[in-house]
Image: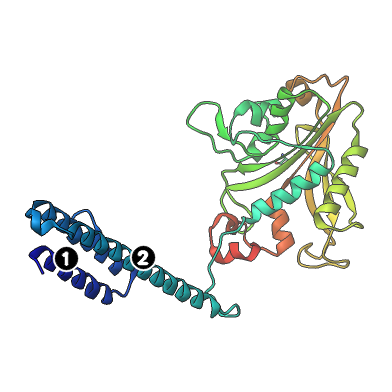
Amino acid sequence: MNNMQNLIETTKQEFISALKKVNSLDELEAVRIAFLGRNGKIGALMDTLKKASPEEKKGMGSLLNELKEFAHHAYEELQQQLQGQKLKKELAKHSSFDVTAYKKHTSSGSLHLYTHLIEKLENIFISMGYQVATGPEVETEYYNFSALNIPENHPARELHDTFWLTLPDYLLRTHTSTVQIHMMEQKKPPLAIVAPGRCYRNEATDATHDFMFTQVECMLIDKNISIAHLLATAKTFLQELFDKKDLKIRVRPGYFPFVEPGLEIDASCPFCTNGCSACKKTTWIELLGSGLIHPNVLKCGGIDPAVYSGFAFGMGLERLAMINYGIHDIRLFHSNKIEFLTQFS
Ligand code: PHE
């Protein structure tokens, strides 16, 4: 046996014993690189052969090719075997999958109570043909007061504890009635809009008063709109909201400078017939401020009060939710207390 033949034979034995030790695809890959790779041992034999003397070379080319083929073949066979084993292991894992096994609870987020309520309200109004509208929370004195028939020095301004900004004439809106004017300016009647949104009042907070709260404003403007339309709409809306077809309403005079006449609308208590804590034993719940839109307000919105009339009503969303869910403190709404929030998910 010449030197070259010897080398080929020992490389083959080395390769065989290396393969025998292989237990994983990673180890197999290491063996492949060591022997069949670009700088592997079998490649190195090729280089040695090129430099060998002519009589040493004789017959060695085919011997070396045989080794190469043998190595490739053995490599592929073992690779398939190992891949098969790996797959079996994976499958075995799944075959013992226990669908009844306890899985640790993973917490997920949910919609805020505000969002739930606003969606519900909007859906009721959308089903009556209304459009959802919004307006800015930072307002001018004009939209919050003057255009709503509350001129400077009018005592009604005192009733709104206003957060004035350092910019002259700017404030945080104290009610969503501001959206009435924006909509009148932007669209032509007939106008049917519902505008939920945040409002701010600079007052001391307690369980029933907060500096930030949510109102929902409803407005309809068309020819010949009367109190009958206002009452029918308010009643239908409240019946849907509380899911009570026999809910009744009653009206009392109310004063809001932007409506004439102005009415307070109460609903018969949706939770009892003879007095409970929600209605403070009166069987009625105060819910809406409302009225027919004052001609001065229509004029400010660019609408001719000789041709058109309209109604508007507004209500506080937190108050509604507090009655509905027995929430005792208005400040909980934006407290970010997880114990509070998760109750409504
Ligand atoms: N904006 C009034 C308030 O904040 C409510 C209201 C709306 C009254 C529309 C009449 C008409 O109390």
Disc on res. 76: 2
Answer with the quarter of the image where residue 86 lies. bottom left
At 80% across and 68% down in the image, what residue appears? 276
Q: Secondary structure at mark 1?
A: helix
**Label 2 to label 1: alpha-carbon separation:** 20 Å
Q: Is residue 183 above or below residue 332?
A: above
At 54% across and 62% down in the image, what residue appears? 337
Residue type highlighted by circle 2: Glu
Disc on res. 193: none
Q: Relative to the observer, which residue lies in front, 289 or 132?
A: 132
Left or right of 42: which side holds 29?
A: right
Q: Secondary structure at mark 2?
A: helix
Which is closer to the viewer, label 2 or label 1?
1
At 57% across and 53% down in the image, what residue appears? 205
Q: Residues within 10 Å of mark 2 (few under 14, many from 20)?
A: few
Q: Is residue 211 above or below residue 110?
A: above
Q: Upstream in the sequence, badge 2 or badge 1?
A: 1
At 11% across and 56% down in the image, what residue appears? 48
Query: Residue tagged by mark 1?
Result: 8
Circle 2/circle 1 CB separation < 8 Å:
no
Residue type highlighted by circle 1: Ile
Q: Relative to the observer, which residue lies in front, 57 or 320?
A: 57
Left or right of 285: which side holds 335?
A: left
Q: Is residue 100 above or below residue 323?
A: below
Q: Position of residue 1 (x, y in %)?
A: 11, 69
Q: Can I make out residue 33 in this image? A: no
Q: Relative to the observer, which residue lies in front, 292 or 198?
A: 198
Quadrant position of ligand 1: top right
Q: How is the image coloured?
A: rainbow
